[in-house]
C-alpha cells in the first residue's frame, strides 16, 4: 500500500514538474494574493485530472456507441485549409476579373432603344 502511494506521488510530481509556467516576472503584489497561492497549489492537480480523467473521457465519448449516445459531433479543425482555399479563390477572381466599365460621358447624346 505504501509503495503504491509513493508511486502515485512520484507520478504526480513528475507530471506537474513537466508543465512550463511561462517566462513572466515575479510581481510580489500579485503573487502574494491568497487566491494566487491557492492557484499555485491547485494548478498541478488540475493538469493531472485533465490528463488522466478528461482526455480519456473525451476519447471514449468520441467513439461509438458513446458518440451516438451523448450526441457528440466530431469537428475537424480545417481552418488552415479553408483559409488557403479562400486565398486561391481571391487570387483567381482577381486574375479573371472583367475589365472595368467604360465611364459614361454625361454630355453624350442618348441613343434611343430599338423597338
Image (tube, rainbow, N blue to C red):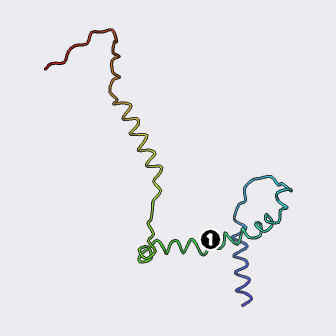
Could you tell me residue 32's position as x and y percent?
85, 61
Badge 1: few (under 14), some or many (20 or more) residues near its Cα, within 10 Å?
few
The residue under the point 44% across, 73% down is 67
Is residue 25 rendered to the left or right of residue 95? Answer: right
Query: At 46% across and 71% down in the image, what residue appears?
Result: 62
Look at the picture and state if 39 lies above or below 106: below
Q: On screen, 35 above or below 105?
A: below
Q: Quadrant of residue 13?
A: bottom right
Q: Which image quadrant for residue 29?
A: bottom right
Q: Position of residue 89 (x, y in %)?
A: 38, 39
Q: Which secondary structure, mark 1?
A: helix
State the residue lying farthest toward the left: 115
Rendered-image quadrant of the N terminus: bottom right
- Examine the image and state in which quarter residue 50 appears: bottom right
Residue 37, position in %: x, y? Answer: 81, 66
Residue drawn at 33 percent across, 15 percent down: 104
In the displayed structure, 60 sits above or below 106; it is below
Q: Quadrant of the C terminus?
A: top left
Query: Closer to the camera, 69 or 61?
Result: 69
**In this figure, which residue is indicated by the disc labeled 1?**
50
User: Where does residue 47 sit, x and y in percent of width and height?
Assistant: 66, 69
Q: Is residue 4 left or right of residue 111?
A: right
Amino acid at each position: 500500500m505504501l509503495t503504491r502511494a509513493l508511486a502515485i506521488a512520484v507520478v504526480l510530481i513528475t507530471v506537474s514538474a513537466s508543465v512550463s509556467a511561462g517566462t513572466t516576472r515575479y510581481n510580489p503584489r500579485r503573487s502574494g494574493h491568497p487566491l494566487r497561492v491557492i492557484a499555485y497549489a491547485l494548478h498541478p492537480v488540475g493538469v493531472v485530472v485533465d490528463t488522466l480523467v478528461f482526455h480519456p473521457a473525451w476519447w471514449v465519448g468520441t467513439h461509438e456507441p458513446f458518440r451516438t449516445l451523448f450526441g457528440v459531433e466530431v469537428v475537424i479543425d480545417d481552418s488552415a485549409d479553408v483559409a488557403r482555399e479562400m486565398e486561391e479563390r481571391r487570387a483567381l477572381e482577381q486574375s479573371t476579373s472583367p475589365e472595368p466599365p467604360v465611364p459614361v460621358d454625361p454630355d453624350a447624346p442618348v441613343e434611343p432603344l430599338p423597338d
